[in-house]
């Protein structure tokens, strides 16, 4: 199926919204796009047997480019803690390989509900304590960051998101990273997570007879490409707004965002 001009414009605008919040909050944008994909792919007749996998694979493909765009913007502002990114990335690659395999053979229903509860807890910790800075020195210990990356990579790959909704609260609550550097550090880590995960979705989906034409494994290219244009361009706007916001405002936004993620996971 070839996408019409009007549909392409609609997809670009949808990607623009996801890209803006990806740059602003250091997420991949997948949490924002997933509900749209579930609605759209079901509407165009994607089989329910592979619906989740196509949503997740397409999501992750877009997240690769969105996170790269966000990370470039944050790096220009020197807001990436690379000494944390590398151990987190090592773990996330390991976790993402496992997550994409599990997603291919099982439902993620129960895990999504558990994850929703975790998001509500993290949101309450961040939002209601936004006036207080977390005490403690930043954590850069590989023995802690690599296992954390494995958890992030596995859950992110299984749920078809970049992992920012998992990594952001970890960085704030557990690792005590400076808030201004959380979004950039998360964006850089997501690059490694999403690349690994989407390769898994492409491999595991290859040759599936239920997939429509113009799919690469579980990635729907027709939809992914125009949305990717919007996300990549508007991610830079989100980074710019992030730079101008104060710490208290960022904490409030992070908290509200995580509440929304929790609600979405419960009702999806």
Image (cartoon, rainbow, N blue to C red):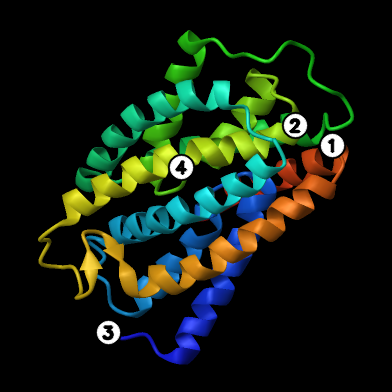
Residue 161 in view, yes or no = yes
Q: Quadrant of residue 43?
A: bottom left
Q: Earlier in the sequence, mark 4 or mark 1?
A: 4
Marks 2 and 1 sit apart, C-alpha to C-alpha, by: 7 Å
Disc 2 is placed on an element classified as: helix
Q: Position of residue 209 (x, y in %)?
A: 10, 67
Q: Position of residue 63 (x, y in %)?
A: 46, 53
Disc 1 is placed on an element classified as: helix
Marks 4 and 2 sit apart, C-alpha to C-alpha, by: 20 Å
182 is higher (above) or lower (below) than 87: below
Disc 3 is placed on an element classified as: loop
Is the residue marked by circle 3 packed among few (<14), some (14-19), or many (20+) residues within 10 Å?
few
**Residue in view at x 22 percent, y 47 percent:** 104
Marks 3 and 1 sit apart, C-alpha to C-alpha, by: 46 Å
Disc 1 target residue: 247
Q: Earlier in the sequence, mark 4 or mark 2?
A: 2
Q: Position of residue 169 (x, y in %)?
A: 63, 31
**Residue in view at x 46 percent, y 82 percent:** 8
Disc number lying in front (4 or 2): 4
Disc 3 target residue: 1
Are the residues at dot 2 and dot 1 in contact (C-beta closer than 8 Å)? yes
Disc 2 target residue: 179
Marks 4 and 3 sit apart, C-alpha to C-alpha, by: 29 Å
254 is higher (above) or lower (below) than 236: above
Disc 4 target residue: 191
Disc number lying in front (4 or 1): 4
Q: Earlier in the sequence, mark 3 or mark 2?
A: 3
């Amino acid at each position: 199926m070839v996408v019409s001009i009007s549909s392409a414009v609609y997809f670009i605008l949808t990607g623009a919204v996801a890209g803006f919040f990806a740059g602003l909050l250091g997420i991949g944008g997948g949490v924002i796009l997933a509900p749209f994909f579930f609605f759209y792919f079901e509407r165009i007749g994607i089989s329910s047997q592979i619906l989740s996998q196509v949503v997740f694979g397409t999501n992750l493909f877009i997240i690769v480019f969105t996170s790269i765009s966000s990370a470039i913007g944050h790096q220009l502002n020197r807001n990436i803690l690379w000494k944390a990114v590398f151990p987190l990335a090592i773990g996330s690659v390991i976790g993402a390989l496992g997550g994409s395999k599990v997603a291919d053979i099982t439902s993620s229903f129960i895990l999504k509900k558990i994850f929703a509860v975790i998001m509500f807890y993290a949101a309450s910790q961040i939002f209601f304590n936004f006036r207080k800075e977390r005490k403690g020195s930043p954590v850069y210990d590989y023995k802690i960051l690599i296992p954390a990356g494995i958890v992030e990579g596995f859950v992110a790959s299984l749920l078809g998101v970049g992992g920012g909704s998992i990594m952001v609260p970890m960085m704030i609550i557990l690792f005590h990273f400076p808030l201004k550097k959380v979004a950039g550090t998360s964006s850089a880590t997501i690059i490694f997570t999403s690349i690994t995960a989407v390769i898994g979705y492409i491999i595991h989906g290859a040759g599936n007879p239920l997939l429509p034409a113009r799919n690469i494994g579980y990635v729907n290219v027709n939809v992914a490409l125009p949305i990717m244009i919007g996300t990549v361009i508007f991610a830079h706007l989100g980074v710019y707004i992030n730079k101008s916001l104060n710490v208290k405002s960022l904490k409030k936004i992070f908290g509200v965002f995580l509440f929304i993620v929790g609600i979405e996971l419960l009702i999806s």
